[in-house]
Image (tube, rainbow, N blue to C red):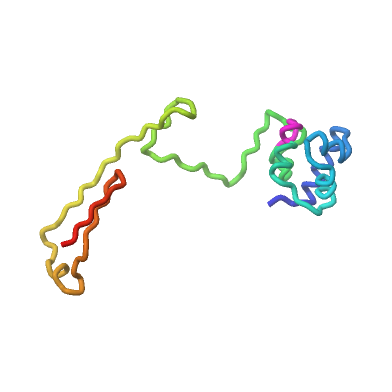
Amino acid sequence: MVNIDDFVKRLEIILDYYGLNASAFADRIGVQRSSMSHLLSGRNKPSLDFVMKILEVFPDVDLYWILNGKGSFPKNDDEEFVPQNVKPYPAPSNVNYGTGDLFSPIEYKEEEKTEIKISSEIKSSNFTSEENEIEKIVFFYKNGTFKVYNP
């Protein structure tokens, strides 16, 4: 969660660093001056669009620094902020991403399919009582079709 008071302090540091007043800063990043005024007074919270415009126009501003004070300003390219307690999402084991570009097709490995074995020891009493009478059987196929059997 972004602390609005701390965000405003960091925004003021940026203004001082570049020698800009609030109006000139608003003009540079392409937002209304009133939006900048409301933000600096604490009336409004910064939008994602506002933050992205700052990063676009002022490349020395680090995303994590402006949002939560971690990192440095001006941005030091040698340091890379790595969020703590973030575990990478494991990739599925049956997908081969290869070394192609983003638009290359993904190849899927065929997974072993388990056979369903029907035991001859199934008690027929489970299927013959009137309360457990089968109304219909539906088979769903991979191509999206299905068949309904009424015994």
Quadrant containing the C terminus in the rendered view? bottom left
Q: Position of residue 115 (x, y in %)?
A: 20, 48
Q: Is residue 147 above or below residue 62?
A: below
Give the percent coordinates (x, y) of residue 67: 71, 44
Left/right of residue 41 with respect to residue 122 in the rendered view: right
Q: Tell me the residue at 42%/28% (across/down).
A: 98
Q: Quadrant of residue 109?
A: top left
* Depth order, front residue of 149/80: 149
Up-down relation of residue 136 to residue 132 (above or below)? above
At x 73%, y 37%, the residue is 53
Q: In the picture shown, does residue 13 fall above or below 123?
A: above
Q: Is residue 150 left or right of residue 11?
A: left
What's drawn in magenta, residue-wise?
Answer: 55-62
Asked if residue 40 lies left or right of residue 118, the reply is right
Which picture quadrant has residue 75? top right
Count numbered badges in the picture: 0
Q: Nearer the viewer, residue 65 or 18?
A: 18
Q: What secondary structure prevails in the magenta region?
A: loop
**Residue pictured at 86% horizontal, 36% vertical:** 24
Question: Residue 100, how many percent across, how many down?
Answer: 45, 25
Q: Residue at x 14, y 63 (%)?
A: 122
The image quarter containing residue 76 is top right
Residue 82: image x %, image y %?
Answer: 62, 39
| In the image: residue 98, left or right of residue 111 | right
